[in-house]
Image (cartoon, helix red, strand yellow):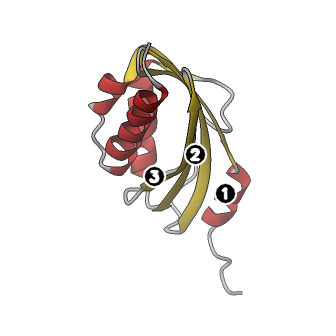
Amino acid sequence: MQSTETNKAAFRRLVEEGPNRGNLDVVTEVLTEDVVFHPAGESDPVTGRDGVRALIQGARTAFPDLRADIDQLVGEGDRVIGVVTLRGTNTGDAMGQPATGRSATFTVVHMLRFVDGRIAEDRQVMDRLSLMEQLQPSPQPA
């Protein structure tokens, strides 16, 4: 069994390499093959490494300047909770909506389960309404 610190390091690596640098090869290294992500606000989970790669790539397409900062990590045994603040400018389609050119800052809470030092499950919670409000186009003058 891996230590909690090893599990935290795997999550840090995923955040730094994936969303921040666009290195999607990290997915193979820190996720189990049958990983299950439960993205915030989505009814269907994303399964498998390819699904997670597509999820990260979609975020980077919607927000090419995406920056994710880990604000807090706590863990015990095979569980880690990470609070991550994301910032970026919406210059690509996001959540089925066209690009707005607006910047947004939002927080995602990740509740992670690990198997042998790799992420096996990620349940996410975020204030999706706040994100959508930030991305609303500015009203046009009459």
Q: Nearer the viewer, residue 6 or 46?
A: 6
Which of disc 1 and disc 2 is earlier in sequence?
2
Q: Which residue position is annotated with label 2?
A: 95
Q: Does 19 sit left or right of 74 as displayed?
A: left
Q: Position of residue 135 (x, y in %)?
A: 61, 63
Q: Position of residue 6 (x, y in %)?
A: 40, 28
Residue in the picture at 45% in, 52% down: 62
Mark pair 2, 1: CA separation: 9 Å
Which of disc 3 and disc 1 is earlier in sequence?
3
The quadrant where residue 29 appears = top left
Determine whether label 3 and label 2 are within 8 Å by CB.
yes
Mark pair 1, 3: CA separation: 13 Å
Q: Is residue 124 above or below residue 76?
A: below
Does dot 2 land on a helix, a strand or a loop? Answer: loop
Amino acid at dot 1: Met
Q: Which residue position is annotated with label 1?
A: 132
Residue in the picture at 30% in, 32% down: 26
Q: Quadrant of the N terminus?
A: top left
The circle drawn on residue 38 is none
Is residue 120 among what the camera can see?
yes
Amino acid at dot 2: Met
Q: Nearer the viewer, residue 71 or 57?
A: 71
Q: Does 53 sit left or right of 136 as displayed?
A: left
Q: Is residue 35 above or below residue 109?
A: above
